[in-house]
Amino acid sequence: MKKTVYTFLVTFVIIIAATSCREKTKAEKIEDGIEEVADDIEEGVEEIEDEIDDATDEN
């Protein structure tokens, strides 16, 4: 019984390790790029909001 459980666990770990090391597909790379651009835009908007707040606070 223990041998079967250990075999199952080792197989499971190998499968997880193999799938986590796979190459990204083109669609995944594109999605990551889009998310990165969206994050950059969001950061830019926040910086602009901060600048506007700073400018209006000074007046």
Image (spheres, helix red, strand yellow):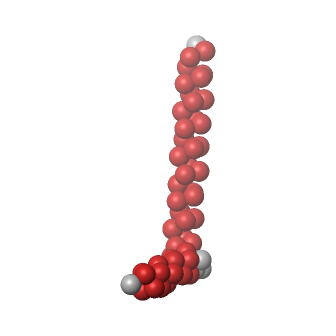
Q: Return the residue found at the far left.
A: 1
Q: Quadrant of the C terminus?
A: top right
Q: Which residue: 56% across, 17% down?
A: 57
Q: Is 52 located above or below residue 22 in the figure?
A: above
Residue 48 to residue 40: above or below: above
Q: Position of residue 16 (x, y in %)?
A: 51, 77
Residue 37 position in % (x across, y down): 57, 57
Compared across the picture, whether 44 is left or right of 15 comes to right
Residue 49 visible at all: yes
Which residue is at 55% across, 38% downward? 46
The answer to which image quadrant residue 47 occupies is: top right
Position of the N terminus by quadrant: bottom left
Query: As displayed, is residue 21 above or below residue 42?
Result: below
Residue in front for this viewpoint, 18 or 8: 8
Image x and y of residue 12, in percent: 47, 80
- The residue drawn where x is 55% and y is 65% is 32
Residue 54: name its quadrant.
top right
Q: Is residue 25 visible?
A: no
Q: Is 27 located above or below residue 42 in the figure? A: below
Residue 56 coordinates in the image, percent (x, y)? 55, 20
